[in-house]
Image (cartoon, rainbow, N blue to C red):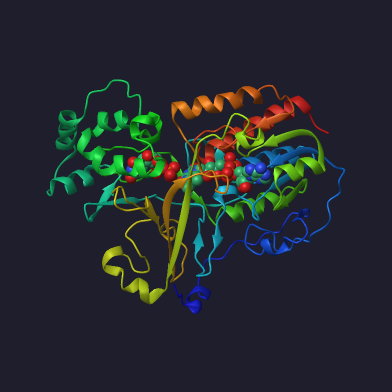
Amino acid sequence: MAVDAADSRRSRWQPIPHSLPSKVSFPSGSIDQGRQRGGIESAIPRPLQADTSTDFLIIGAGFSGLVIAERLASAGWKCAVVDRRAHFGGNAHDRIDPAGVLIHPYGPHYFRTNSPRIVDYLSRFTAWHEVSYKINSHTRGRYWSFPINLNTFEEYLGRASTSEEFSTWLEQTRVPIDNPQNSEEVIISQVGRELYELFFEGYTLKQWKRHPRELDASVCGRIPVRTNRDDRYLSETFQALPANGYTAMFENLLAATPGIDLRLGMDFKEAKARWNCKHLVFTGAIDEYYERRFGPLPYRSLRFEHESFDAEQLRRRDAISGKSGFWQPAMQVNYPDAETPFTRIVEIKHATGQNIAASTILREFPKDWTPADEPFYPVPAPAARAAYQRYAALAVNEPNTSFIGRLATYRYYNMDQVTAMALTEADKLLARYGSP
Ligand code: FAD
Ligand code: UDP
């Protein structure tokens, strides 16, 4: 879609200035891949020595890899961080798209946490842009307030109501289940079958290609249900985005940590052949580490479709978005209908607050994972967990390798949780190895 370049240039949103770490490189030939934020524009390719040695070799430059690298390097250890992608930040990476819009190319990343320790730690590298994350659901041909709250109930009834009436209705409608064992039970035990079928069943089937009955209760259980008018998607006490984005935050982390040698565009196999290290930290998929000797673990992947709109195109959407300069009424609209092939449309500009006339939307199409895809989601289900346990049993017998992060521990973890995991593991390693 065409966008008005002049409008993009007029944007007042600017990344904060940063300096880059001294040692960042790509394998020869891959320098072009660095010409985006989060790759390193100034990187000078240099040949790798076959006998390079480092204290810690860290595979993966996402949240878990960069946080543990920062802690270890700040204690004086040499850290080589390697990522097969051409950028750092892992799935939280963000960048400016051709329309000038700051996007989350791997799906929306809404930072939230209940942990002051995590906020304090990350605040060393970023200021925050507070966001009340608001979303809608779209089904039966209309937008609904979501997650389920008193507004949703009024939309369902087609008239005004009260928290008392809604609570009474829920008491009469919910299926009494004391200890919900799966994602169907956790929702029907709160809101009954009709709202479950309206908002959850179809979405979950598309997203996971499994019935909610086959998924842990925590999957759908993480979506709040409220009888008041609080329509925020999340419930954590701290909800904010890094003020200039995740990539800028990680750029600041790297700039503040000279002991990190970051290599982009390189995978684990090559890194293993090139470095000797005291200790390996692996944040990739654990079954890949073990060359899938017990077979691949199940993952869900995603295909993304981006579409950008200029000011004139967005003006024609005013009646739908209700907000000038936007394509849809909320940062995220979920599509639970089975007939719609995607699960959600994200217009991240609602959340970033970027001041730009253009806007970009991202449609998410769930897909089966194949080795050619990103393993975006470990599957939170008993059979998948049992398959993971076979690999985990091997991992505990590797004293000089740490497995951290969402893929290496096969957990449906948020960014704050993997940050906590990296900080804890760094403490353990520093207790074990001391300082150089
Ligand atoms: P990753 O970000 O996956 O980083 C691992 C890195 O390792 C990757 O860059 C990968 O390229 C690299 N790697 C893997 N294998 C190898 C190898 N063999 N060789 C070299 N490099 C390798 N969390 C939230 O808190 N809020 C949200 O709103 C949210 N939304 C999400 C939406 C989507 C669509 C997805 C997929 C995730 C979302 N998350 C969200 C979760 C969040 O992405 C993770 O918690 C976090 O990014 C995990 O960080 P990580 O470092 O463990 O893994
Ligand atoms: N979910 C749903 N309907 C919705 C939103 C979520 O059924 O409108 C279920 C679905 O199974 C989803 C899970 O709740 O995978 C967790 O939703 P969340 O938005 O937290 O997913 P993520 O952002 O991690 O993809």
Q: Nearer the viewer, residue 243 or 265?
A: 265
Q: Measuring from the top left, give residue 414's x and y in whole percent.
A: 50, 39
Image height of 79 relative to 314, above or below: above
- Quadrant assignment for the N terminus: bottom left
State the residue at coordinates (22%, 34%). 193
Is residue 40 among what the camera can see? yes
Q: Measuring from the top left, give residue 261's x and y in whole percent.
A: 77, 48
Q: How many marks?
A: 0
Task: Specify the farthest residue to the left.
Answer: 159
Q: Measuring from the top left, give residue 382's x and y in whole percent.
A: 45, 26
Image height of 190 relative to 150, above or below: above
Q: Nearer the viewer, residue 71 or 270?
A: 270
- Quadrant assignment for the C terminus: top right
**In the image: residue 304, left or right of residue 247:** left
Tell me the quarter of the picture where residue 142 sits. Answer: bottom left
Task: Specify the farthest residue to the bottom.
Answer: 6
Q: Nearer the viewer, residue 3 or 32?
A: 32
Image height of 360 relative to 369, above or below: below
Q: Measuring from the top left, give residue 167's x and y in whole percent.
A: 19, 33
**In the image: residue 317, left or right of residue 363:** left
Tell me the quarter of the picture where residue 362 sits. Answer: bottom left
Is residue 80 among what the camera can see? no
Ligand 2 visible in quadrant: top left
**In the image: residue 174, left or right of residue 360:** left
Image height of 74 relative to 400, above or below: below
**In the image: residue 202, left or right of residue 6:** left
State the residue at coordinates (27%, 49%). 145
State the residue at coordinates (53%, 69%). 98
